Amino acid sequence: MNQNKAVVQGISILNWIVYVFVGLNLVFYSDYAIADLQFKLISTLAVVMISTYVSWLFINPSAGILLLQFWIFNSIFFVLAPIAVISNPSSWFVNSSLDQGTKIQAFYLIMGALLISFIGSQSRVKLTNRPQLGFLIDIKRYKFFFISYVILFVVLIIFGQQFIANSLVDYSSGRAISPVSPMESGLMRAFLVAIPMIFLLCILRLGNRISPATKIVVSFISLTILFIFANPLGNSRQTFLLAFLPIVFASISGNFVLGRLIAFLIFLVTIFGQPVSYAITHSAQNFRLLGFEGVFNSFSFKPSQILTGGDFDSFGMFATGLTHLGPQNFNIPFSQFFGVVFYWVPRSLWPGKPQDTAVEIATLASFRFQNLSAPWLLELLANGGLVLVLLGAFLIPRALKKFDLFSNNHDFKFLLTYLLIGSEFILLRGSLLQASGVVIFGLVLSRFLVKKNQ
């Protein structure tokens, strides 16, 4: 026990050192000097405080992985990335379209929102003493749905070769593949990615309730389907992580040390794995244009270059939204959230169905390229203005903390927990309308596969 505690403390200290080193490097050793002493002071304070708080969450056994991931995301996308964008020239058009005063104003507002999130994270949550209703996986439903899904997959193999082929191509254009058939829709892709992931989570949860042979067959088929529809080379990195990260965390369920180690690796890979991921997903284009060496020449591990790129546009998009959103641009409060909840409704039946929040903001800002993110703060801003930003900043971490503390004594809670763990980063980065499909499908399927334990 003492050895495990020492390992986790070591991970926590290492996380603090790496974060502070990167953060202070961005503040004081930028490509060009920032004369604003107030900005340097506040950004330095933000780096030290958030790194200390995240490191404390690492060693705190009562801090769940959902709350920890929430703060890891914010520490990168809403602290390090803004400092990098303000302190360094950026060629990414979202950042370069903003003046320095707007960037600093947006940064200060984010710091205020994160301070409120800290209060929400530390607020005491009250759990009811009522016994929780147990939901256990129904083996008969599970087998029936698995067989039905395999039949559907075979049908797609036979009649949907074009769809299968397109799921494996390189995303060198910087945007999702244009639909080539009804099955290419986001609805169908969410369906195909969510279901095998839930099947695998069920296998991990069922344990001795099913035979080893069944485990092997279901695992092999489910993993094969996942690699086809959510492979890291031909599909978006977010979909790949959303499909496989729940399986990783569920596999080490109950192992505190491994859980914290993976959380630290998520922090490192989110920043320093981005150049590798980008080079892989653009490898075909780089190889055609630059030859074999071009694939490797695209690597750059300098934080000031990584954090000012398109994959970290959350700050730039929030600042853009802060500039362009106003009372004249709000049709119906919460209209974007309505689009998320009813995302499965075809636009032919709902002509006024909202677009992704990022697309709406990009249109207002006259951006030609619209494959952008809309982080959680921007989603709140677009749906209810600054009031909802401040309210959501308090309630979201509080809700995550409460969910982390719920007893994990029944199967539905297990499935929902790891579904959210895998999808949390993509939901926080947004747009919600684009990111929520797999989560909603996973939630519905999980509820279908379980029955009340009387």
Image: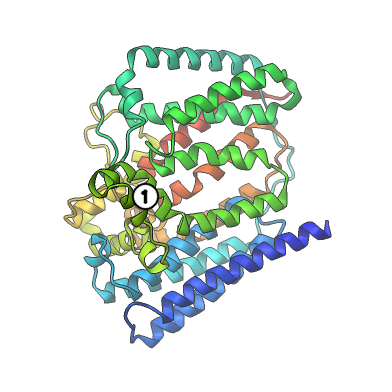
Q: Position of residue 236 (x, y in %)?
A: 38, 41
* Vertical side of 87 occupied by 2: above or below: above
Left or right: residue 195 versus residue 110 is right
**Can residue 174 be seen at all in this image of the molecule?**
no
**Can you see residue 244?**
yes
Q: Position of residue 226 (x, y in %)?
A: 48, 29
Where is mark 1, residue-wise?
279
At x 68% / y 50%, what residue is drawn?
258
Which residue is found at the position 41% from the left and 60% from the top?
389
Which residue is located at x 35 percent, y 52 percent?
374
Q: Is residue 184 left or right of residue 54?
A: left
The residue nearer to you, when weighing 96 against 452, is 96
- Relative to 261, is 191 above or below? above
Relative depth, front residue between 30 and 389: 30
**In the figure, is residue 420 to the left or right of 11?**
left
Secondary element under disc 1, as helix, strand or loop, is helix
Q: Where, quadrant-wise, is the N terminus in this rendering?
A: bottom right
Which quarter shows the C terminus?
A: top right
Q: Is residue 161 above or below residue 307?
A: above
Q: Is residue 303 left or right of residue 51?
A: left
Q: Nearer the viewer, residue 32 or 150?
A: 32
